[in-house]
Image (cartoon, rainbow, N blue to C red):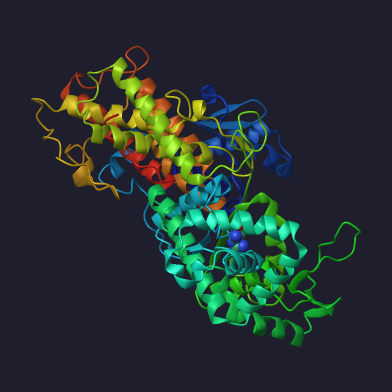
């Protein structure tokens, strides 16, 4: 479906062509949402620049454009204001027709793209051998949201977990185990993540304090690289156990990821470096092999290269990421590759992207994008840590989220025992899980990706404001109207027994209202809600391009506010008991469309909904 703005732009271009001739079609009609609803919904200020070209007063140009505009079916007669702005206000009947056209569409007006792309989203990607901690949560949540959104558009998304499963930390671990935990060598399969964590801490301490151990640990890296069977076996056991732990967390978060760690690219590295040297793109430099890409300098102002091979012969992060791009474009045929990491890696990716372009491994048709995110801070604005300054384990963070949500849910129920029919312990546990995990995800996604944000349980679990509990509650409240609307009312059949998660479908979700209800928009709160509903698809389009999930949370929050007004006894309208029946059904349809939009929107954020809360 065309967005409201696109519809206006088309008509404006036709008017521009009428005023300045055929090239008018090529002009940007400069249509923006108005800041103030008194001036209507959208405003064009194209007359201001155009007037200069035509040598006339902007208000005259505006008047000529208005005269040439054929908009009667879309808007009220446009008005000229200020120095020559043209203001548009949509007609309720047009909005109603737009909504009526999507009411039977489970995708709410967003058709799958005609030409699906292959997209790689590289996210989560922790370094193995340590438990996942709070530093991994943003990449996991944001990456999953981006992947869900692009999948929803119909693209083929490869969700890659580019874990750090190679390098010095493994030499350190292998050597430590060899020396002090030899029983592990006898049966590496018995290894548990808790041991691994303890070994890591101990091995790191020894590595930093005992230079001789450090030498032995480095030698163990060489063993590993040269394929020593014992070293490989321990390494495999470490990775397997570490990944098992990661996937426990992913499963809990409802995140799907395919593991393809750094080691996957090992076989490609020697030929990659050899090729760069043969093509004279990389040169030997102090024993290392450097790939100079224009535009980067170090602190002393000297050219800063990608280092593709270290002086000890080892490869590093830059090399693997170059090989990654080459594989993803060449073998995976990706048209778009998206990396979600801490913003501090921005320069790394910019350089790797430039290198891949220069080497011809990423043709111009392939889009390389780094989504860099800010830090999570504690309530005090300092880096988020445990009370004694340690890193916060992700598993413990998620446990706490669910515990805290359970307390909130119990509070809610005490306040209003009537509200929720099902108060079984299973229902409670499910609600706590969805609210708790939803709160963590929503808090993360609702902040501008690049900004740091404060991790504050009280804010994210609040029932008021732009939070998951508020959104989930708004959804559940709408769904309860459905139950109230049902008894004894013709046209509404009994509720389906079970809510089915997954892609929305009209059968399970449309309240069994007829699929082609005439929508009637009379009250201002109805018109405002309709406009919000119609803004869903353009919002998704924008997020899919800009990769900024907070635009979607902002939108959903705006939608639920518009719904609150519509539902409010004073500012809004009657719904369940509205008369006549045509008005009642139309309002129930608006409720239904709001619920479906919230549900789909939350699903794209990776948050499940609750039918009761
Ligand atoms: N393992 C890296 C880290 O923990 C993130 C990897 C991101 N992906 C990539 N292709 N470099 O910082």
Which quadrant holds residue 479?
Answer: top left
Asked if one can make out residue 535 in the rendered structure from this viewpoint, the answer is no
Q: Residue at x 59, y 68 (%)?
A: 174
Residue at the farthest top position: 570
Quadrant of the rendered structure where residue 167 is?
bottom right
Along the line of sight, the residue nearer the viewer: 577 or 65: 577
Which residue is the extreme one toward the bottom?
278
Quarter of the image containing the C terminus? top left
> x%, y% of residue 266?
59, 77
User: In the picture shown, does residue 116 fall above or below 557?
Assistant: below
Residue 478: x and y, percent? 29, 29
Q: Is residue 389 visible?
A: yes
Of 563 and 376, nearer the camera is 376
Q: Nearer the viewer, residue 191 or 272?
A: 191
Q: Is residue 444 left or right of residue 612?
A: right
Location of residue 115 with respect to 515 vertically, above or below:
below
Q: Quadrant of ligand 1?
A: bottom right
Q: Residue at x 81, y 80 (%)?
A: 283
How many numbered circles are shown? Answer: 0
* Image position, residue 186 (x, y; %): 47, 72
**Seen in the image, is 67 located left or right of residue 110?**
right
Q: Residue at x 18, y 24 (%)?
A: 484
**Image spot of residue 75 (x, y percent):** 43, 33
């Amino acid at each position: 479906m065309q967005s409201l703005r696109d519809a206006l732009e088309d008509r404006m271009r036709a008017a521009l062509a009428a005023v300045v001739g055929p090239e008018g079609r090529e002009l940007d009609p400069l249509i923006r949402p108005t800041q103030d609803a008194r001036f209507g919904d959208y405003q064009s200020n194209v007359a201001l620049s155009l007037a200069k070209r035509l040598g006339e007063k902007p208000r005259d140009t505006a008047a000529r454009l208005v005269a040439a505009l054929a908009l009667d079916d879309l808007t009220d007669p446009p008005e000229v204001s200020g120095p020559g702005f043209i203001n548009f206000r949509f007609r309720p009947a047009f909005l109603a027709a737009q909504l009526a056209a999507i009411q039977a569409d489970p995708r709410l007006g967003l058709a799958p793209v005609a030409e699906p792309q292959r997209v790689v989203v590289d996210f989560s990607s922790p370094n193995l051998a340590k438990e996942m901690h709070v530093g991994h949560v943003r990449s996991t949540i944001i990456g999953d949201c981006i992947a869900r959104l692009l999948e929803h558009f119909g693209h083929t998304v490869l969700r890659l977990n580019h874990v750090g499963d190679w390098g010095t930390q493994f030499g350190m671990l292998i050597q430590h185990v060899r020396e002090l935990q030899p029983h592990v060598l006898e049966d590496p399969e018995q290894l548990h993540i808790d041991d691994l964590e303890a070994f890591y801490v101990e091995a790191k301490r020894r590595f930093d304090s005992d230079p001789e151990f450090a030498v032995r640990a480095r030698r163990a890296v060489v063993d590993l690289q040269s394929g020593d069977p014992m070293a490989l076996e321990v390494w495999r056991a470490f990775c397997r156990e570490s990944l098992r732990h990661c996937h426990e967390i992913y499963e809990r978060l409802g995140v799907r990821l395919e593991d393809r760690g750094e080691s996957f690219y090992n076989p490609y590295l020697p030929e990659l470096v050899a090729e760069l040297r043969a093509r004279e793109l990389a040169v030997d430099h102090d024993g290392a092999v450097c790939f100079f890409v224009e535009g980067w300098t170090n602190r002393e102002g000297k050219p800063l290269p990608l280092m593709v091979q270290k002086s000890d012969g080892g490869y590093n992060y830059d090399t693997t990421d170059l090989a990654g791009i080459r594989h993803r474009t060449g073998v995976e045929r990706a048209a778009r590759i998206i990396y979600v990491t801490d913003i501090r890696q921005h320069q790394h990716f910019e350089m790797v992207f430039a290198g891949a372009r220069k080497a011809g491994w990423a043709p111009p048709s392939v889009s390389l994008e780094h989504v860099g995110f800010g830090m999570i801070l504690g309530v005090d604005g300092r880096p988020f840590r445990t009370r004694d300054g340690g890193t916060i384990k992700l598993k413990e963070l998620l446990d706490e989220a669910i515990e805290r949500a359970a307390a909130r849910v119990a509070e809610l129920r005490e306040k209003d025992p009537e509200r929720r029919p099902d108060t079984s312990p299973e229902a409670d546990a499910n609600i706590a899980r969805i609210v708790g995990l939803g709160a963590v995800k929503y808090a993360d996604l609702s902040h501008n990706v690049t900004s740091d944000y404060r991790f504050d349980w009280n804010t994210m679990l609040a029932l008021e404001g732009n939070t998951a509990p508020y959104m989930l509650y708004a959804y559940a409240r709408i769904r309860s109207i459905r139950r109230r609307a049902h008894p004894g009312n013709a046209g509404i059949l009994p509720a389906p027994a079970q809510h089915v998660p997954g892609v929305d479908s009209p059968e399970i979700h449309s309240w069994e209202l007829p699929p082609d209800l005439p929508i009637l928009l009379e009250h201002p709160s109805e018109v405002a809600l309709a406009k919000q509903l119609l803004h869903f698809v353009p919002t998704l389009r924008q997020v899919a391009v800009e990769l900024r999930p907070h635009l979607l949370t902002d939108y959903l929050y705006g939608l639920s506010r518009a719904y609150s007004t519509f539902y409010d006894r004073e500012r809004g309208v009657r719904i369940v008991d509205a008369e006549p029946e045509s008005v009642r059904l139309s309002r129930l349809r608006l409720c239904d469309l709001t619920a479906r939009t919230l549900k789909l929107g939350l699903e794209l954020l990776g948050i499940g909904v609750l039918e009761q809360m």
